[in-house]
Amino acid sequence: MIQPSLHEERYPAEYWFSCYSHLDTEAASAVSLEGKRVVYYDVETQKRADEVGGWNNADQMLVSIAITYDDSAGFRTWLEKDVPDMIRYMDGFDVVLSYNGDQFDSRVISHYGDVGTINRKSFDLAQYFHHRLKHRLKLDTIATATLGKGKTSDGLQALKWWKEGKIQDIIDYCEQDVQVLKDIVEFGKENGFILYTDLQGKEIKVDVDW
Protein backbone atom coordinates (compact mmCIF):
# COMPACT_ATOMS: atom_id res chain seq x y z
CA MET A 1 0.00 0.00 0.00
CA ILE A 2 1.32 3.44 -0.89
CA GLN A 3 1.79 5.53 2.23
CA PRO A 4 0.18 8.98 2.11
CA SER A 5 2.53 11.93 2.04
CA LEU A 6 2.58 14.31 4.97
CA HIS A 7 1.10 17.14 2.93
CA GLU A 8 -2.35 17.38 1.44
CA GLU A 9 -1.89 16.35 -2.18
CA ARG A 10 -4.22 19.02 -3.55
CA TYR A 11 -1.96 21.77 -2.21
CA PRO A 12 1.80 22.30 -2.65
CA ALA A 13 3.98 20.88 0.15
CA GLU A 14 5.39 24.28 1.03
CA TYR A 15 1.87 25.47 1.81
CA TRP A 16 1.55 23.01 4.67
CA PHE A 17 5.08 23.12 6.07
CA SER A 18 6.12 26.74 5.91
CA CYS A 19 8.30 27.58 8.96
CA TYR A 20 7.87 24.00 10.17
CA SER A 21 10.72 24.05 12.69
CA HIS A 22 9.32 27.05 14.56
CA LEU A 23 6.96 25.95 17.33
CA ASP A 24 5.31 28.86 19.08
CA THR A 25 2.34 27.61 21.08
CA GLU A 26 1.21 31.02 22.24
CA ALA A 27 -2.56 30.75 22.53
CA ALA A 28 -4.73 31.89 19.68
CA SER A 29 -7.87 33.81 20.42
CA ALA A 30 -10.25 31.62 22.37
CA VAL A 31 -13.00 29.98 20.33
CA SER A 32 -16.01 28.63 22.18
CA LEU A 33 -18.45 26.28 20.46
CA GLU A 34 -20.50 25.75 23.61
CA GLY A 35 -24.18 26.35 22.94
CA LYS A 36 -23.52 27.32 19.31
CA ARG A 37 -25.28 25.96 16.26
CA VAL A 38 -22.40 24.59 14.18
CA VAL A 39 -22.33 23.45 10.57
CA TYR A 40 -19.29 21.61 9.18
CA TYR A 41 -18.56 21.63 5.46
CA ASP A 42 -16.13 20.51 2.77
CA VAL A 43 -16.00 21.11 -0.97
CA GLU A 44 -14.56 19.13 -3.87
CA THR A 45 -13.93 20.75 -7.23
CA GLN A 46 -14.26 20.02 -10.93
CA LYS A 47 -10.93 21.55 -11.91
CA ARG A 48 -7.34 21.75 -10.69
CA ALA A 49 -5.70 25.07 -9.88
CA ASP A 50 -3.49 24.86 -12.96
CA GLU A 51 -6.60 24.52 -15.14
CA VAL A 52 -7.91 27.92 -14.04
CA GLY A 53 -4.69 29.92 -13.95
CA GLY A 54 -3.61 29.28 -10.35
CA TRP A 55 -4.86 29.25 -6.75
CA ASN A 56 -5.86 32.91 -6.90
CA ASN A 57 -8.66 31.82 -9.22
CA ALA A 58 -10.15 29.23 -6.86
CA ASP A 59 -13.62 30.63 -7.59
CA GLN A 60 -13.24 29.27 -11.12
CA MET A 61 -12.49 25.70 -10.00
CA LEU A 62 -16.24 24.99 -9.66
CA VAL A 63 -17.92 22.64 -7.21
CA SER A 64 -18.32 18.97 -8.02
CA ILE A 65 -19.72 17.92 -4.64
CA ALA A 66 -20.09 19.67 -1.29
CA ILE A 67 -21.04 18.07 2.02
CA THR A 68 -22.39 19.70 5.17
CA TYR A 69 -23.07 18.23 8.57
CA ASP A 70 -25.07 19.64 11.45
CA ASP A 71 -26.68 17.99 14.45
CA SER A 72 -30.23 18.59 13.19
CA ALA A 73 -29.98 17.45 9.57
CA GLY A 74 -26.93 15.17 9.69
CA PHE A 75 -24.97 14.86 6.46
CA ARG A 76 -26.32 16.66 3.43
CA THR A 77 -25.01 16.36 -0.13
CA TRP A 78 -25.02 19.42 -2.38
CA LEU A 79 -24.52 19.21 -6.14
CA GLU A 80 -23.21 22.21 -8.08
CA LYS A 81 -26.73 23.39 -8.87
CA ASP A 82 -27.53 23.35 -5.13
CA VAL A 83 -24.60 25.51 -3.96
CA PRO A 84 -26.59 28.80 -3.79
CA ASP A 85 -29.05 27.01 -1.48
CA MET A 86 -26.13 25.60 0.53
CA ILE A 87 -24.72 29.10 1.05
CA ARG A 88 -28.08 30.33 2.33
CA TYR A 89 -28.37 27.24 4.54
CA MET A 90 -24.98 27.77 6.17
CA ASP A 91 -25.76 31.45 6.72
CA GLY A 92 -28.32 30.31 9.31
CA PHE A 93 -25.75 28.81 11.71
CA ASP A 94 -23.72 30.46 14.46
CA VAL A 95 -20.44 28.86 13.38
CA VAL A 96 -19.33 27.60 9.96
CA LEU A 97 -16.54 25.11 10.61
CA SER A 98 -14.07 23.93 7.98
CA TYR A 99 -10.51 22.85 7.37
CA ASN A 100 -8.85 25.48 5.17
CA GLY A 101 -12.24 26.90 4.27
CA ASP A 102 -11.07 30.50 4.53
CA GLN A 103 -8.31 29.97 1.99
CA PHE A 104 -10.05 27.51 -0.30
CA ASP A 105 -13.62 26.23 0.15
CA SER A 106 -15.32 29.59 0.70
CA ARG A 107 -13.43 31.01 -2.27
CA VAL A 108 -14.67 28.14 -4.46
CA ILE A 109 -18.30 28.61 -3.47
CA SER A 110 -18.05 32.41 -3.84
CA HIS A 111 -18.58 31.70 -7.54
CA TYR A 112 -22.22 30.89 -6.69
CA GLY A 113 -23.18 33.59 -4.18
CA ASP A 114 -22.22 36.02 -1.45
CA VAL A 115 -20.09 34.28 1.19
CA GLY A 116 -19.63 37.33 3.42
CA THR A 117 -21.78 35.91 6.23
CA ILE A 118 -20.04 32.55 6.03
CA ASN A 119 -16.65 34.24 6.29
CA ARG A 120 -17.74 36.28 9.31
CA LYS A 121 -18.97 33.13 11.07
CA SER A 122 -16.03 30.99 10.01
CA PHE A 123 -13.99 28.82 12.34
CA ASP A 124 -11.22 27.48 10.08
CA LEU A 125 -9.35 24.78 11.98
CA ALA A 126 -6.37 24.93 9.61
CA GLN A 127 -5.97 28.64 10.31
CA TYR A 128 -6.42 28.03 14.05
CA PHE A 129 -3.44 25.66 14.13
CA HIS A 130 -1.39 27.85 11.80
CA HIS A 131 -1.85 30.76 14.21
CA ARG A 132 -0.77 28.65 17.17
CA LEU A 133 2.09 26.69 15.64
CA LYS A 134 3.33 29.10 12.97
CA HIS A 135 3.12 26.29 10.42
CA ARG A 136 0.30 24.47 8.70
CA LEU A 137 -0.96 20.95 9.29
CA LYS A 138 -3.03 18.81 7.00
CA LEU A 139 -6.19 17.22 8.31
CA ASP A 140 -4.86 13.69 7.83
CA THR A 141 -1.79 14.40 9.98
CA ILE A 142 -4.01 15.38 12.91
CA ALA A 143 -6.60 12.64 12.35
CA THR A 144 -4.05 9.82 12.22
CA ALA A 145 -2.39 10.82 15.49
CA THR A 146 -5.50 11.96 17.35
CA LEU A 147 -8.12 9.48 16.18
CA GLY A 148 -6.04 6.57 14.91
CA LYS A 149 -7.63 6.93 11.49
CA GLY A 150 -6.95 9.11 8.49
CA LYS A 151 -8.49 10.22 5.23
CA THR A 152 -9.56 7.59 2.71
CA SER A 153 -8.25 9.44 -0.34
CA ASP A 154 -7.16 12.91 -1.50
CA GLY A 155 -8.33 15.86 -3.55
CA LEU A 156 -6.51 14.81 -6.71
CA GLN A 157 -8.27 11.44 -6.68
CA ALA A 158 -11.59 13.24 -6.25
CA LEU A 159 -10.78 15.28 -9.37
CA LYS A 160 -10.11 12.06 -11.29
CA TRP A 161 -13.41 10.61 -10.09
CA TRP A 162 -15.19 13.71 -11.35
CA LYS A 163 -13.71 13.33 -14.81
CA GLU A 164 -14.70 9.63 -14.73
CA GLY A 165 -18.25 10.41 -13.62
CA LYS A 166 -17.84 8.55 -10.31
CA ILE A 167 -20.01 10.92 -8.30
CA GLN A 168 -20.81 8.54 -5.45
CA ASP A 169 -17.09 8.00 -4.82
CA ILE A 170 -16.65 11.76 -4.42
CA ILE A 171 -19.65 11.95 -2.10
CA ASP A 172 -18.31 9.14 0.09
CA TYR A 173 -14.84 10.69 0.26
CA CYS A 174 -16.08 14.21 0.99
CA GLU A 175 -18.48 12.94 3.66
CA GLN A 176 -15.65 11.03 5.32
CA ASP A 177 -13.55 14.23 5.38
CA VAL A 178 -16.35 16.06 7.16
CA GLN A 179 -16.75 13.16 9.61
CA VAL A 180 -13.03 13.26 10.42
CA LEU A 181 -13.16 17.02 10.94
CA LYS A 182 -16.15 16.66 13.25
CA ASP A 183 -14.48 13.85 15.21
CA ILE A 184 -11.33 15.94 15.72
CA VAL A 185 -13.34 18.90 16.96
CA GLU A 186 -15.33 16.70 19.35
CA PHE A 187 -12.15 15.03 20.61
CA GLY A 188 -10.55 18.41 21.26
CA LYS A 189 -13.66 19.72 22.98
CA GLU A 190 -13.84 16.70 25.29
CA ASN A 191 -10.11 16.32 26.02
CA GLY A 192 -8.71 19.84 25.65
CA PHE A 193 -5.98 18.80 23.18
CA ILE A 194 -5.25 17.18 19.83
CA LEU A 195 -2.19 15.31 18.57
CA TYR A 196 -0.12 15.27 15.42
CA THR A 197 3.14 13.63 14.35
CA ASP A 198 5.92 15.91 13.13
CA LEU A 199 8.37 15.27 10.29
CA GLN A 200 10.75 13.47 12.65
CA GLY A 201 8.00 11.09 13.76
CA LYS A 202 7.58 12.72 17.17
CA GLU A 203 4.05 12.95 18.56
CA ILE A 204 3.15 16.53 19.46
CA LYS A 205 0.33 17.52 21.82
CA VAL A 206 -1.46 20.80 21.15
CA ASP A 207 -3.84 22.30 23.72
CA VAL A 208 -7.08 23.61 22.23
CA ASP A 209 -9.73 25.93 23.64
CA TRP A 210 -12.88 25.46 21.64
Image (cartoon, helix red, strand yellow):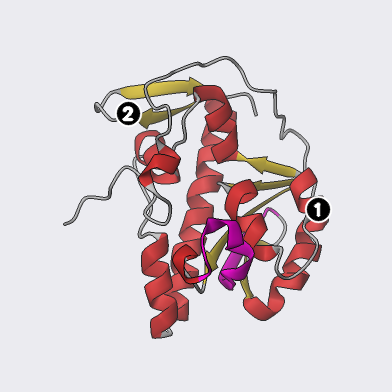
Of 146 and 125, the residue lying toward us:
125
Above or below — where is 6 with respect to 193?
A: below
Above or below — where is 36 with respect to 76?
A: above
Above or below — where is 150 with respect to 110?
A: above
Q: Residue at x 81, y 64 (%)?
A: 88
Q: Position of residue 187 (x, y in %)?
A: 52, 34
**Horizontally, is 102 left or right of 202 in the view?**
right
Q: Amino acid at mark 2?
A: Asp
Q: Earlier in the sequence, mark 2 or mark 1?
A: 1
The reply to whether residue 147 is in sight is no
Mark number displayed over residue 116: 1
Q: Indicate the secondary structure of the residue bearing disc 1.
A: helix
The reply to whether residue 148 is in sight is yes
| Mark 1 surroundings: few (<14), some (14-19) or many (≥20) residues within 10 A | few
Of 107 and 174, the residue lying toward us:
107
Stretch of the chain drawn in magenta: 52-71
Q: Residue at x 39, y 27 (%)?
A: 20
| Mark 2 surroundings: few (<14), some (14-19) or many (≥20) residues within 10 A | some
Magenta span contains residue 57: yes
Of 163 and 33, the residue lying toward us:
163
Above or below — where is 206 with respect to 150?
A: above
Q: Which residue is mark 2?
A: 198
Mark number displayed over residue 139: none
Q: CA distance from mark 2 to mark 1?
A: 35 Å
Of 22 and 147, the residue lying toward us:
22
Q: Position of residue 68 (x, y in %)?
A: 63, 60
Of the 4 image quadrants, the one containing the N terminus is bottom left
Of the 4 image quadrants, the one containing the C terminus is top right
